Image (cartoon, rainbow, N blue to C red):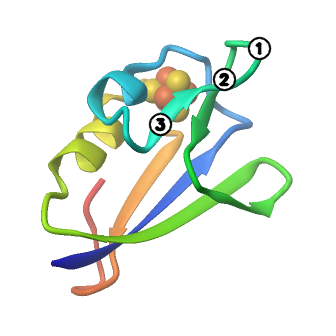
């Protein structure tokens, strides 16, 4: 298990939903369908949301970040201190 921290910047999100396709457990569409939501995330700033969780499978979340066309998502491995995407 590793502890991941996901940071999502809604301000730069363009609503392509590649993130939701790659990791629907963590990402979805907002109520108006024009931006992503980070499920369970908390607002660190008005447009920046953060979610920390433990997982044995980092690939879906890392894939979501890599698929984002505007780099709105950052995934950090808090266990190793590395930025994964
Ligand atoms: S992939 Fe990036 S731009 Fe597209 S909805 Fe997700 S966060 Fe927004």
Q: Is residue 46 left or right of residue 57?
A: right
Give whichever of 64, 38 is nearer the camera: 38
Residue 29 in sight here: yes
Q: Earlier in the sequence, mark 3 or mark 2?
A: 3
Q: Is residue 5 left or right of residue 38?
A: left
Q: Secondary structure at mark 1?
A: loop
Q: Secondary structure at mark 2?
A: loop
Relative to 7, is 64 above or below? above
- Look at the numbered disc 3 and say if its residue's Cβ is closer than 8 Å to ligand 1: yes
Q: CA distance from mark 3 to mark 2?
A: 10 Å
Residue 15 percent location from the top left of the image: 59, 17
Q: Is residue 57 left or right of residue 40?
A: left
- Label 2: how many Cα within 10 Å (few below 14, some 14–19, many 20+): some
Residue under numbered circle 3: 27
* Residue 35: mark in rendering: 2
- Look at the numbered disc 2 and say if its residue's Cβ is closer than 8 Å to ligand 1: yes
* Residue 32: mark in rendering: 1
Q: To which quarter of the image does residue 84 belong?
A: bottom left
Residue 75 percent location from the top left of the image: 37, 59
């Amino acid at each position: 298990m590793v502890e991941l921290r996901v940071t999502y910047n809604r301000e730069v999100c363009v609503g392509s939903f590649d993130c939701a396709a790659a990791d629907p457990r963590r990402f979805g569409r907002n109520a108006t369908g024009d931006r992503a939501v980070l499920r369970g995330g908390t607002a660190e700033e008005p447009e920046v949301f953060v979610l920390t969780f433990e997982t044995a499978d980092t690939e879906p979340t890392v894939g979501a970040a890599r698929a984002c066309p505007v780099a709105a998502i950052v995934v950090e491995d808090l266990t190793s201190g590395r930025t994964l995407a």
